[in-house]
Structure formats: C-alpha cells, structure tokens
Amino acid sequence: MLYLVRMDVRLPDTLVGQARADLLAREKAYSQELQRSGEWPHIWRVVGEYANYSVFDVDSHDRLHEVLSGLPLFPHMDIQVTPLASHPSDVRA
Amino acid sequence: MLYLVRMDVRLPDTLVGQARADLLAREKAYSQELQRSGEWPHIWRVVGEYANYSVFDVDSHDRLHEVLSGLPLFPHMDIQVTPLASHPSDVRA
Amino acid sequence: MLYLVRMDVRLPDTLVGQARADLLAREKAYSQELQRSGEWPHIWRVVGEYANYSVFDVDSHDRLHEVLSGLPLFPHMDIQVTPLASHPSDVRA
Amino acid sequence: MLYLVRMDVRLPDTLVGQARADLLAREKAYSQELQRSGEWPHIWRVVGEYANYSVFDVDSHDRLHEVLSGLPLFPHMDIQVTPLASHPSDVRA
Amino acid sequence: MLYLVRMDVRLPDTLVGQARADLLAREKAYSQELQRSGEWPHIWRVVGEYANYSVFDVDSHDRLHEVLSGLPLFPHMDIQVTPLASHPSDVRA
Amino acid sequence: MLYLVRMDVRLPDTLVGQARADLLAREKAYSQELQRSGEWPHIWRVVGEYANYSVFDVDSHDRLHEVLSGLPLFPHMDIQVTPLASHPSDVRA
Amino acid sequence: MLYLVRMDVRLPDTLVGQARADLLAREKAYSQELQRSGEWPHIWRVVGEYANYSVFDVDSHDRLHEVLSGLPLFPHMDIQVTPLASHPSDVRA
Amino acid sequence: MLYLVRMDVRLPDTLVGQARADLLAREKAYSQELQRSGEWPHIWRVVGEYANYSVFDVDSHDRLHEVLSGLPLFPHMDIQVTPLASHPSDVRA
Amino acid sequence: MLYLVRMDVRLPDTLVGQARADLLAREKAYSQELQRSGEWPHIWRVVGEYANYSVFDVDSHDRLHEVLSGLPLFPHMDIQVTPLASHPSDVRA
Amino acid sequence: MLYLVRMDVRLPDTLVGQARADLLAREKAYSQELQRSGEWPHIWRVVGEYANYSVFDVDSHDRLHEVLSGLPLFPHMDIQVTPLASHPSDVRA
C-alpha cells in the first residue's frame, strides 16, 4: 500500500558540528536502506525548503509508523501522511 | 523536471447524465495519453476524496501549464503545484 | 487496518422531499450493512453539526476508497481520512 | 458520554535521559489505569506523528478535564476535545 | 453540563418574504421556550455579524444535539460546540 | 457592556516552583476580586486545555484593556476579545 | 468608544441593473449620514478589493450592531469588529 | 511605487459563449494598454491555476485601486495587494 | 498616502528590568515624534492584546519601510501593512 | 524559467554583534553575485517585514534549490516557491 508523506525538518540551533553531521549521516543511511529494500520507493526535495515529499510502500499502518518513528531525525520533523489508492485512470493499474 | 500536483475536483450539481459521462471520458483519455507519453508518470487517488496526487515530468513551467490548463476538468478543479528537486539521499539520483 | 474518518455533509438546497428522503434511507442502509459486516465498527455524531466521526477497519486503502466513494451521500460530503496505528500504551494491543 | 480527543505531544529538547524515561513511564501507567477502568476505551497512534486519537467515556465535562489535566504529559501536549453523540444510523445505538 | 455554542447563520438568497418571516418566528419561539426551561441560559449577538454565542446547560451530548438539530434554522447554520468545565478560580463553583 | 474573552495560557518552562505558585496565586486573587465586583461575571475552563472562556461586564474598552493587561498571567497569555450585543430573542433582554 | 470594522462585500451575480444601483445608492446615503453625525469618523477603501476598513465611534455594542445590521448591504457583507482602546503612546490621548 | 498583486479568477458557470469571449478580450486589451503605458510592468501566470502574479508601478494607492477596480474581470477575481519597497541588496537600487 | 498597520509585540522572556524599560521608552519617544510630525496620525491599542492598529500617512513605500524598520521594537514585532485608498462614500474625500 | 520566491527571515536572538554583521554581509554578497549573473533578476522588500519577494530565472528546479539552500541565511528563513509561466496577455511574451 502506498502513502504520500511530507517531512519538514526543523533542527534545533543547538545541534551543531560533529553531533549534527553524525545525525544527518545516520538519517541518510537509514533512508537509503529502506529505499533499497523497496519500502521507500520515492524521495524528492521540496524546492527551497528543508523538506521532502516521499512515497512509502509498506504492508500496514503499523509498519509505516515503525519506519517513520525510527527516523533519526523524527524528533525534529513535522510529518504528514496521506494514504493513496490506485486511480481509475492509471494506465499501470 | 518533476512537479507534484494535487487536483481537487468540484463538479457543478448541474453537470449530469451524458454531458457528465462525456466530460469524464475525455478527461480519462487525455490523462492516459500523457501517461503513455511519459509526461505524467504517476497518478494516485487521495483516499476518500474526489482528488488525486500526480507527478509530472515536463521540460518547462510553460509546458506544465499547457498540460494542466488543457485538462477537460480544468474549469472544475483546484490545483496546487509543488516543484520537486532531486534529494541528496536518493539512491537513484 | 484502522482509519479515522470525518464526514461533513452539505446537502444542496434543491434536494427536498421524497428524493431527499430516499437518498438518506439508502445512505443509512449502506452504512448499516458495512457496520454489520465489521468494516465500519464505529460511527458517532459530531454534536451540533451535520457530520460524523467514524472508524473503518478494512484490508487496504483501495477497499476504503471503494467503500467511501460508494456512499450515496459521497457527492455531498467533505471527507478526511487519518490512518491509525496501534498505540504502545494500548492495554488491548 | 463519549468524547473524541486528539493529543499532540511536544517534549522540550531539554527533557532527556532518566527524567524523560520516568515521565513517559508515568504517562503509560496513568493511561493504562484509565483504560482498565473503562473511562478511556480507545487509544490509537496517528501514523507518522507523536500524537494520538482517543475516545473517553466519562460522566461529565469536569471529570474529563480532571482526567486530561492529570496526564503527566499534560504540560507538553496540545489537546482538542470533540463531544460525540449517538448516530441515528448506528446499529448498536 | 455547560457548552459554549457559536452559531453563524447563512440564509439562502432565495428565502424571502413570508417564508423567511415564518422561519425566523419559529426560530425565536423555539429558542425562547428553551431559554425559559433553563436549558439555554445565555444568548448574545456577535456584534456586526449574523451570529450568536450561546451557553447551553443540558444533561448529555445527545440532548444537546437534539436541541441544536431541532433549530428551525439548523440547515442554514454553521455551529461550533465547546464543552465547558468549572474553573478553579470561579467564586461561585 | 459584555465581552466574550478567551484566554490561552502558555507558561514558560523556566517558570517553576515557588515563583510559579506565587504567580498563580496572584492570578487567582486578582480574578476573584473582579468576579466579586461584578466586572467578571463568568469564567469557565475549556475542557482539556489550559484556557478559559470568560464574560466581562465593564463600562468601556479602556477599562477592559486595563483589567486584562493587569492580569498577572498577561505576559503568558494569548487573548481574544469578542464584543457581545443583546440578542433579539433573549427572554431577559 | 472606537471600533475598527472591516467589511467585505460579496454581491450576488443576480443583483444587476437598477436594483443594484438603488441598493448602492441607499448604502452610500446611509453611510454618509452616519459620517456626518460623527458615529462613522473614518472609511477607507482596501486597495484592490471590494472592501473597506472603517472606524466607528459609538456609545455601546448595541448601538454598533444596530448601525451595522442596518446597512443596506448588510446581507451581502462579511464584517469583522475589533474594539480599540486608547494607546499609552498616543500624543492626543 | 511598486506593488505585487495576485489575482485569482473565478468565472461563474453561467458565463459562456460570446459573452465570455467578449469579456476576456476586453480584459486582455485593458491589460495590454496598461503594460504598454508602463504602469503594469510584469504579468506572470501561476502554473496550474487561473491566476496571475503581477507587478504594478503607479503613483498612488488611489491610482492602483482605479486600475484594478476597472479590470473587466474585477467582479470575478480575488485580489491581494502587497506594497514593495526597494531592497538594500538590490544591485539596481 | 495612507496605510493601515497592525503591530503585534512579542518581547523575549530574557528582556527584563532596565534594558526593557529603556527599550520601551525609546519606542514611545520614536512613535511620538512621528505622531507630531504628521506621518503617524493614528495609534490604537487592540483591546486585550499587546498589539496596536495604526494609520500612517507617508509619501512612499520606501519611507514607510524606513519608519517601521527603525522602530526600536521592530525585531520583536509581527507587522502587517494594508494600503488604503480613498473611499467613494467618504464625505471628506 | 521563472520562479517567484518569498523569503521570511527569522534571526535567532542569540545572533548578535560581529557574527551577525558577518552573516548579513555574506548574504548580501551572495545575492548580488547572483543578481549580476542574471539568475536573480528581481528582489524587493516586503514593506514593514523582514522579508523579500524575489524572482529567479534559472535552468532547473535543482539549480534553484542549489541557489536557495546556499544562501548564508537559509537556516534562518522560511521560503515559499511559486513556478511562473508566461501569461497570454503579456505584451513581451
């Protein structure tokens, strides 16, 4: 099942230097592992904002929450989830 | 270049019967032609709403406006466009 | 999987008399069939509004959209869907 | 009487380590006691957010405020309360 | 139990003449009967708007919905309900 | 003249212990003096929130601002003021 | 006492020709009479909108509502009222 | 002086055929005359919407309102005006 | 030219004592000088809020920005500017 | 391709003195270099706010994000991007 997810990142001013670099590196590794496994098929940058739109493809709401709440940046993000159904005009559906 | 587009359809109560069926058929044909040409790579239904999220892949803003304003349902839709850039964590970028 | 759904009904002023009564009767029958099948376990009236909060328990986003878009009142409702996961403090989870 | 309650948690960055773990443990115990007593019949996680939707079943507004303002996390939450009435289509009503 | 209720009236342009006068007369009579019975202890006009803030004192959510949905103007109003608890600083509580 | 006033309290995290207790005690005393004088005839708790709806009965806008800006909690509150007129359906007017 | 009032006019499409001209003429005469009496000391056009910001100087909330609800355009306007107090930095206060 | 202006067009469903074509032709001629005179230096289409962002360069607020309220489409547009000052980083200022 | 300006003040909690008193004294002196010069003809307190509505009468957008950005409290204020034109019903215009 | 960009600056209170002056000087130099290269053809101050509206003319979404995320003030700004197409009434198009 597909979900459109928007994530807005708001890092605290006090997070700087190596601690910040480490956190961002862990976020990137975490994301790429899920992309490779197929559960996170799309990630795009929102132009001009520290934010992304992503599409997730997971088996259940519980799995999506597990994935999102496990993001290293989760405590510093506002996240909005929209469930997506197949569209009757979709040529691939 | 990629754009995330949300379309919310609000058909007038006076549009019924064959006129309505014809309009929706033209919308579907128009959409599927663009999907097949590669300019409209994704279309998803927003669950519970007469709305979709789509991704467009076109060469310019002018082309996107040409495509969207040419939709048979364009006079009956609210449309929001978000330009998307490649994400530094994207394993395919 | 569970979804919280809010439905706000806005009937057109032109819908009156028997046509209106028939539509509402079909809505009620449709809802009660889904309640009995277990896919619509909760429905509550929002106090003071022509609106309800409901919980749906279905197997997929596609099934939920099928159920909601099939509501006889669907053309006259604003619907918001929120996917629900199990809560770590839930004594029944 | 039933109330739908949404709680959004915003923990301060300064709350860490044991103080944080203790607070969350007290919140969980407080919630589970009320779930077992019957006054907090439903609690669901909002997917992707540090938030929950809950249903409370209490005898009065005063009792609900007593319960909510007694939550260990109350100073760190935004709470919205919606009173729920029985719905005329409810097969259990 | 007390509830603060805001009602915003939006009469259709097509409601004129005697039909309009009759409806407003029925609304007034309905309101005054509930004021005299004690269930509608306060009603104030919002200055400059076709709207009122009212306080209701009823035994249950179901009773409040019965009262509000029975208003002759109910189909033409937006209504917001806020449950009120006693305040610890209230000298009368 | 009557005014409906909503006050939302947002205490800073740094206000704790005796300083906090003293401030709240002064707020309560200040409120109760105005309730007894008749200028603050109603105060209700908004269920689930650190907020109140109040009705003030004062002679002028200047007097209301004097009263509100003198609240010990004024620097920590968001306040919204709605002027109320008598309602033509009010049985007491 | 002073009030800042914003009025947004939304004339129905069906109001045309002489009926429209007459209504606007009555509105203008009504407004100018109150301006001359001193109760409506300021009226400004919001640039680019069919709207105005005005300042009223009346003795009571009831009088302001009487004045505003008597506007010939009242059924076609959205009105917002903000009570104004004297400012401690005002050189004329 | 410069102003940023956003115009959102909402044509009534009843405006069709020659009446609609004539109105749009008059709008275009009106706009182009002001562009050529220098008072309307920029006009851009908002991608995907029946809307534009424009920059106006006029001598006064009164002149801008005269220009905007004279638009043939004025009764069918929502307009927002933002006054612009020169920016200290502008290399042309 | 006239502008309606709303200013909402949000002083940081860390600004206390003499530093705060000095800042407010400079703000008052700055405002009163502009009031006396005629560029700031009106200033009113929004009842119940640390905010004001003001009318400015200056020769250009650049001058207004110079005046507002020079306010000693400018770094601590949210400011909204609305350009005002003369109204066709104004008896003084 | 053109984009309208609004930037709202919110500097932290802790950024003062030379660090602040250096940051603002770097921002100005960065902006002016892009203005001279032709990629940032317009920058205007929003009157009364620490904000600007700008027009960018770049070859791709990716380039715009590169430019904006490279702004020295980027961590302290809220940015909104609107893609602009050519307008059919534009005399220069």
Image (cartoon, coloured by chain):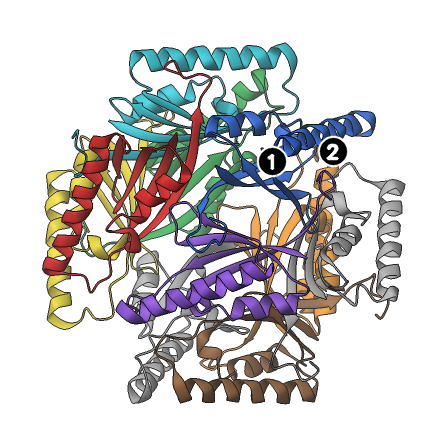
Chain colours: A purple, B blue, D brown, E orange, G green, H cyan, I yellow, J red
In the figure, J82 relative to G26: above or below? below
Taking the spot 46% from the left edge, 89% from the top edge, the residue there is D22
Same chain for marks 2 and 1? yes
Q: Does residue H7 appear in the picture of this structure?
A: yes
G82 with respect to D91 (left or right): left
Horizontal arrangement in the rendering, residue E18 relative to residue I75 (left or right): right
Q: Secondary structure at mark 2?
A: loop
- Give coordinates of residue I84: x percent, y percent: 31, 33
Query: The residue tagged with tag 1: helix, strand or loop?
Result: loop
As shown in the figure, which amino acid type bears the numbered disc 1?
Answer: Trp
> Given the image, on which type of amino acid does mark 2 rest?
Asp
Q: Which mark is residue B40?
A: 1
Residue neighbourhood size for the residue with mark 2, other residues' Cα within 10 Å, grouped as few (<14), some (14–19), many (≥20): few
Q: Quadrant of residue H54?
A: top left
Percent x, y for residue G86?
26, 53
Q: CA distance from mark 2 to mark 1?
A: 29 Å
Kindly report which numbered mark, 2 or 1, lies closer to the viewer in this rendering: 1
Closer to the N terminus: mark 2 or mark 1? 2
User: Which label number is shown at residue B13?
Assistant: 2
How many marks overall?
2
Mark 1 surroundings: few (<14), some (14-19) or many (≥20) residues within 10 A:
many
